[in-house]
Amino acid sequence: MVEALVFFIAASLLLYILLGGSDFGAGILELIPAKDRREKQKHTINRAMGPVWEANHIWLILIVVILFMGFPPVFTKLMVALHIPMIALLVGIVVRGTVFTFRHYDAIQEPVSQRAYTWLFGLSSLWSSYWLGVIAASLTRGTIPVRAEAFQEAYLDPWLGWYPASVGLFVSGIFCFLASVFLIGESRDDERLQEHFRHRAAAFNVAIIFLGALVFFASLGEQRSLATEFIGHPLALAAMIVATVLFVALWVSMSREKVMLTRIVASGQVVLILFGWWIIYRPNAIITTEGALTFYDAAAPEATLRQLLIALVVGSLLIFPSLIFLLRVFKFTGSSEESE
Amino acid sequence: MDDLMAARATMAFSLGFHIIFAAIGMTMPFFMSVSHWLHLKKGDPVYLELTKMWMRGVAILFAVGAVSGTVLSFELGLLWPQFMEHAGPIIGMPFSWEGTAFFIEAVAIGLFLYGWGRMKPWVHWGTGLVVGISGFASGIFVVAANSWMNSPTGFDWEDGQASNIDPVAAMFNDAWLHQSIHMQVAALQAVGFAVAGVHAFLYLRGRNAKLNLTALKIAMAFGAVAALVQPLVGHFAGERVAHLQPAKLAAMEGHFKTTTYAPLTIGGIPDEESETMSWGLEIPGALSILAHRDPSAEVIGLDQFPKDDWPNVMVVHLAFQVMVAIGMLMAGLGLLYFWFLKKKTLPRWFLWALVAATPLGMIAIEAGWIVTEVGRQPWIIYEVFRTEEAVTPMPGMVYHFVLFLVLYLGLAAVTTWLFWRQIQNTQQKLESHG
């Protein structure tokens, strides 16, 4: 039962990173638009993200609900120790979700307010991505205190440091990469914009390698170093190597303009990186100052887990068909038709 | 402000903010569906124009509701970690179903907002209806979770730990039915009147008479019926509270001393020190009748509870009076509306009354939640776990409060401004079309 629930957490996390991540990344890309394609880029992102952004973000709520119902000690420890980065993330989520909608539905479209929305959307997307990375890194640093008196030890040490900061940048980089790859396929009606996204994808592709190296380097200063753990675990190491080698496949696929293949390869890379991370840390949910808290330790009573699983299975049966319908309706058609 | 007060203020403000958007998000799609249906049936473009006008409003409000709801799912842990550690496994079930419903709602709203011309018209209409149904269902699930805090069941409590957890029994606790019906009817009522009020105003200002009258009638069809049903639902809820949480009922009524033939006090200022009510209008025996259907029935007063276990009587009593007064007023307006409808005339003074009533339903919803939440204090899980034990150990909660206060007030200001622009723009378009 625990395994099945952990599978749902992992699946939700993966989908959140792939789908929600492209959404965050699209926001960040608006901070660095193509010079002569600023309006067209905005338009493309509106069209591509508008119908799906709300659904893309519910994966996060799903993770929160599974944690607090199924693994309450994990949830509460995170919410106490990572109070500050959680709040930072929430502010970002509130601002970017509302501003994105406001930009589209503002009845009077004039340059000043539109520019303000775009700027806020981009900035809050970067901000949220960064804090998501910080939170992810802090789960397994071994700095979440079991008992702490001093403010610094209880509320700052868990997430302060070069390593979480580097993961914040790495995650932002991944999101930009995913968004660029996704938007290549969404801009088929504009050759030059498509070319622009292809360049962005290549650039962020290189950036991720450097940011990944930065993460490994920063982790050397940690009690538990991600770098040594990755290298020490054959499967994790293999996943990392395959993910890196796949860059070649990605570049070939991009240059041959294979949209779907490019998306699959890019997602595959992200899946491999997450897989490596997961294989090292499973079955640990978080690592505290006094050692690991596993999903088994933290699991709620059987009766609760059963109900949670029923809800998730039935929920999936309802959600996936409707999601597939959503994606089919809005798969790229090349028309620039808007809701209005 | 100490940390507990700041945490409570943050929760109150976050919920009070979210609930307005949630109420609109789960009811307005139904109004929209009616108008959309009329358009598909009759082909009159005014219905299409109205559907799209409402749709733009729903899109904005839904986004604010969705993100403020996301914040709340985190706030449960950020503010009340000890509560969630105990309550999560017991009461997570309605939240997991709420997650499912919300997911479907988010997919459906994407389909509806952007689906014009991409689906068969009736399929598209159906997606709009699904937005309403799944939103309405999420509302029921969330209220079911809250009702468990008032009427905790489905577990045994020993030495500060829960055992023998039964999530199904917890979800269908004794309070879920009356609380969710009361809330869902309130949402229809408040949003119906609010929408009708705005369109009454635009109509009175001489703008697009046909569109605004149609809008008013659709909204009032929901709002007026709900307003007439609500006093009955409210009475049912009151009886349940008298049975399940006598301390809350006593605070609502400002009823200090346990008596038979208990009087109903209308208005009045309670004084916790002297345990008396002043300035109220007393109706002898009426409280006994309302609570137990018998004038000679004993109604438990606050004197049966140690003062440590009292909620803030002043706040609960006044909020309750405000809610009931508004409810009665709205029921009266609902009755008048049907009377005028039958006479096929809507006099201007009545339309102005509807304009004045625009915010009333929302005020009543806020007041009602103050009664439920403040009335449960000092407990977070009634008679099991105290709010002060549940609060986060994090110091400086006042900064957290101020941050969200500023963020949400800013959001409210921008949303209002956007609506003003929306209305300006629609009217201009309509006028230029002739």
Image: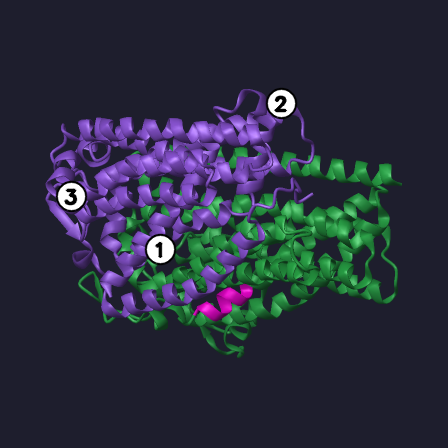
Chain colours: A purple, B green
| Residue drawn at the location 35% of the way across and 61% of the way down | B92
**Magenta-drawn stretch, dominant element (helix, strand or loop):** helix
- Which structural element holds mark 1? helix
Residue linked to disc 3: A288
Q: Give the chain of mark 1.
A: A
Horizontal and vertical percent for residue B144?
Answer: 44, 64
Residue linked to disc 1: A65
Is residue A133 in sight in this rendering? yes
A29 or B379, which is in the foreground? Answer: A29
B409 or A183, which is in the foreground? Answer: A183
Find out whether the residues at labels 1 and 2 contact each other: C-beta distance under 8 Å: no
Residue type beneath disc 1:
Val
Horizontal and vertical percent for residue A107?
Answer: 69, 36
Residue type beneath disc 2:
Val
- The CA distance from mark 1 to mark 2 is 39 Å
Q: Does the magenta stretch include residue B178?
A: yes
Q: What stretch is highlighted in magenta?
A: B175-183
Q: In which quarter of the image is residue B418?
A: top right
Image quarter (top left, top right, bottom left or bottom right) of the N terminus of chain B: top left
Q: Does the magenta stretch include residue A49?
A: no
